Every structure is written in C-alpha cells, then in structure tokens.
C-alpha cells in the first residue's frame, strides 16, 4: 500500500522517506540522516506544527528537532489530529 503519511492507533506518524525535506536541530553542525526508511514520529513529542523559515511544513519537536516534510499543511494537520486521537489513517 502506497502512502505519504500514515498514522497508527498507538499515536505514531509514519512519513515516507521520499517526502522528508530535512531533519535538523537548529544551531547544530549537521542534521540527522534518513536512509530510505520511513520516519516514525511519536505525536506526543510534537511541540507544534507550522512552517519553517524556508516555508516548508514542519513538525517542531519537543527535543528541538525540526522535521520538514513535502506535504500540504492540511495533510500534516490531519495526520497530527488523527495520531493525537489514536486513529489509523493513510494519506496518499
């Protein structure tokens, strides 16, 4: 099954690797690497969802990381809300 973002009943968000723009922590030397595997995000660790300074949809994490993804804001918001409600959803 093809997906861009997928949520689980455990409150996790899976983001397809090809839709990740950057995973970085501001003021750090280098960002994290995504090696072709889906990125798994625990919805309880997301501080908020917004746009970064480059205009990309970004999950701002409580740990300070910024996860920028190549999706519409509405899709990311829907995934966030579904994961928060522990609802399984696939967004293509």
Image (spheres, rainbow, N blue to C red):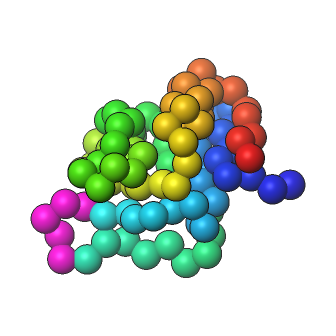
Asked if residue 70 shows in the view, the reply is: yes
Total marks shown come to 0
In this view, which residue lies farthest toward the front? Answer: 55
Q: Which residues are magenta?
A: 25-29
Asked if residue 80 shows in the view, the reply is: no
Horizontal arrangement in the rendering, residue 50 relative to residue 71 (left or right) = left
In this view, which residue lies farthest toward the right? Answer: 1
Task: Tell me if residue 55 comes above or below residue 33 in the rendering.
Answer: above
27 inside magenta stretch: yes
Residue 16 on image: x %, y %? 63, 60
Horizontal arrangement in the rendering, residue 76 relative to residue 49 (left or right) = right
Task: Tell me if residue 84 comes above or below residue 28 in the rendering.
Answer: above
Task: Tell me if residue 6 comes above or below residue 21 in the rendering.
Answer: above
- Quadrant of residue 9 in the image? top right
Residue 57 on image: x %, y %? 42, 46
Q: Residue at x 34, y 49 (%)?
A: 55
Q: Quadrant of the N terminus?
A: bottom right
Horizontal arrangement in the rendering, residue 66 relative to residue 2 (left or right) = left
91 inside magenta stretch: no
Q: Main secondary structure of the magenta part?
A: loop
């Amino acid at each position: 099954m093809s997906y861009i973002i997928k949520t689980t009943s455990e409150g996790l968000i899976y983001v397809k690797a090809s839709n990740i723009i950057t995973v970085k922590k501001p003021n750090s030397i280098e960002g994290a690497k995504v090696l072709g595997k889906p990125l798994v995000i625990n919805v309880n660790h997301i501080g908020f969802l917004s746009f970064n300074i480059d205009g990309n949809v970004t999950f701002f994490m409580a740990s300070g990381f910024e996860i920028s993804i190549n999706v519409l804001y509405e899709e990311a918001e829907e995934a966030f809300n579904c994961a928060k409600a522990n609802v399984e959803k696939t967004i293509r």
